[in-house]
Image: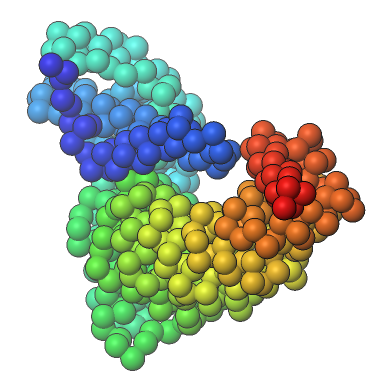
Amino acid sequence: MAKTGVLETDPRVAELKKELQRLVKSIVEDDDYSVEVMDRAREALCSIKDLKVKRSMSLKLHGPHSFPEEFRCPLSRAMMRDPVILATGQTYDRPFIQKWLKAGNRTCPLTQQVLSHTMLTPNHLIREMISQWCQSHGIELTDPDQYGNEDPIMDADRSRFIDLLEKMSSSALEQKEAAKELRLLTKRMPSFRALFGESLDAIPQLLNPFSQNKGGIHPDLQEDLITTLLNLSIHDNNKKLVAETPMVIPLLMDALKSGTIETRSNAAATIFTLSALDSNKALIGKSGVLKPLIDLLEEGHPSVMKDVASAIFNLCIIHENKSRAVHEGAVKVLMKKIMNQTHVDELLAILAMLSTHQKAIEEMGDLGAVSCLLTIIRESSCDRNKENCIAILHSVCLNDRTKLRELREEENTYRTISKLSQTGTARAKRKANGILERLRRALNITHTA
């Protein structure tokens, strides 16, 4: 029987595996899979790999084994992976002392001596001793080069983190100062994003000003807190925790409706990043968030359009959210924006996503989608846009035979569909040939009659 490791019990990995399985099944079974599906599958696989590597490293260096004190980094308090000697002769783990130096410190953390230089010398003796100890205890010491981009968490970081969260329950002035600092720290330092994942209480503490001020908080404070949520949601390990914290989604919905433009844009961006997980797509969709997203899309503020469109697209990957989006009037808003040539690339992708929904197709036909989409195919130089247009038209003509006449007139005048069947992407060619076949059948039926 296969050995079950800790990784398999991690809910984040289970969720990513479920999403990867769905995406791979779509690629294998559906000839019409899009490039976006392949990109999402690759991203899911990379995320699983990253979690496996990090979990493996954590188990190896922070597991139940007690190890000699001389192997412990004075800064991280964990076993060193890449021991290096500072100018004072003290040994530290490379990533932690590098972080200390990058912060502008020019003293030794242990002795407080001023450094004559900041060069780091590998401590080969300690490295070899650690290697031999790990080997004798059946622990693989991973190559430190694989972790060169890791942002280590030091005791000082953790202390600062706790202090800032405590200030979120203090005076209004302290809340504003702490929120601004947390926004900056979670943007610049992955370690601070990771710290929020260590405690179930951290996010509620961060959002405490919303609970304290039922009448509303200062717009600047709202912007800092919503942006901090965005920074946290970028960290893959936080996505599930952030979305499942009860007050987060309602606060994001409120932020979509009010606040500064940056607040509204960042709220949409947060929903986009959180919805990378399928379980979050369902959770967020049930909350009613699609209505304020669609309203914000209709408002059309240039700086929020891309984030809002990305959030709607991600949510509508699952069928139940397509139904919700159609019910909330997405098709009408999308068609209006596309006809006005506003963010055509992003909005066409959403419209193509919705074209598998019966009511959406009916609405597109009623709103003049056929003429609009044919014009885009003729005039656009973007293969992806042409592919999305012909995919939508294929669904429209399958649903409503009365639209075949308009397609036939287009073909007779411009040969738009025939040209695409020869020059488009593989998917566009299939859809174009499908439409041409239906046009031929309809013509044969007419002649026979």
In which image quadrant can residue 410 be found? bottom right
Q: Which residue is painted at 73% across and 47% down in the image?
A: 448
Q: Which residue is painted at 36% across and 49% down in the image?
A: 277
Q: Relative to residue 345, is residue 221 drawn left or right?
A: left
Q: Nearer the viewer, residue 412 or 333?
A: 412
> Residue 291: percent from the left, percent from the top?
45, 75
Q: Which residue is painted at 69% across and 44% down in the image?
A: 441
> Residue 401: percent from the left, percent from the top?
64, 58
Quadrant for the N terminus in the image: top left
Up the image or down, 276 lies above or below 247; here it is: above
Q: Nearer the viewer, residue 232 or 163?
A: 232
Would you say residue 83 is visible in this rendering?
A: no
Q: Nearer the viewer, residue 251 or 408?
A: 408
Residue lying furthest front: 449
Q: Relative to residue 84, is residue 126 drawn left or right?
A: left
Count of number-bearing discs = 0
Residue lying furthest bottom: 215
Q: Which residue is painted at 48% across and 82% down in the image?
A: 258
Q: Relative to residue 44, is residue 205 drawn left or right?
A: left
Q: How is the image coloured?
A: rainbow
Up the image or down, 11 lies above or below 377; here it is: above
Would you say residue 247 is visible in this rendering?
A: yes
Residue lying furthest right: 413
> Residue 355: percent from the left, percent from the top?
55, 57
> Residue 136: percent from the left, percent from the top?
14, 8
